[in-house]
Image (tube, rainbow, N blue to C red):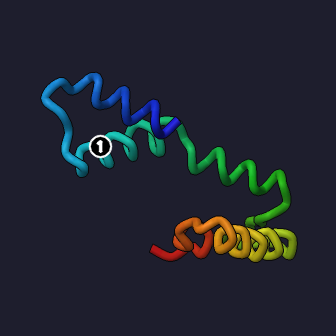
Amino acid sequence: RVLFRSIGALNASPAGLSEAQLQARFLSGYVDGTSQVDKRIDEQLREGNIEFRNGRFRLTAKGQLVAKINIVLAELLSIDPRYVRGTE
């Protein structure tokens, strides 16, 4: 989806886009425009990985296990650890 969105944005901009413009289009058109965060939250609530209590989302015991597995897999597959550790 990200690839298609990026290609589409560049196709609609014959003069090209800067990196900042591509990021802005992605955030406004994909993340905000299609409620991706809401969809992921609903998905994780259904899966039982997170819970919502007292106005905050938290990992469940299952979610904590999934997070640990993700960290190990990221290390094995050389995936940028920021994607699984939640750090910028």
Decide which of 86, 74 is in the foreground and name it: 74
User: What amino acid is at disc 1?
Assistant: Leu
Q: Residue at x 32, y 48 (%)?
A: 23
Query: At numbered mark 1, what does the secondary structure look like: helix, strand or loop?
Result: helix
Identify residue for label 1.
22
Determine if residue 5 is in view: yes
Q: Report how many numbered discs are placed on residues in the image.
A: 1
Residue 15: quarter of image: top left
Residue 22 sits above or below residue 51 on the image? above
Query: What x and y, as percent, mark residue 82?
Result: 52, 71
Instruction: Tell whether 87 sits left or right of 44.
Output: left
Residue at the extreme left: 15
Asked if residue 26 lies left or right of residue 63, the reply is left
Residue 55 showing in the rendered view: no
- Does residue 41 sit above or below 6 in this rendering? below
Q: What is the quadrant of the C terminus in the image?
A: bottom left
Q: Position of residue 47 (x, y in %)?
A: 84, 54
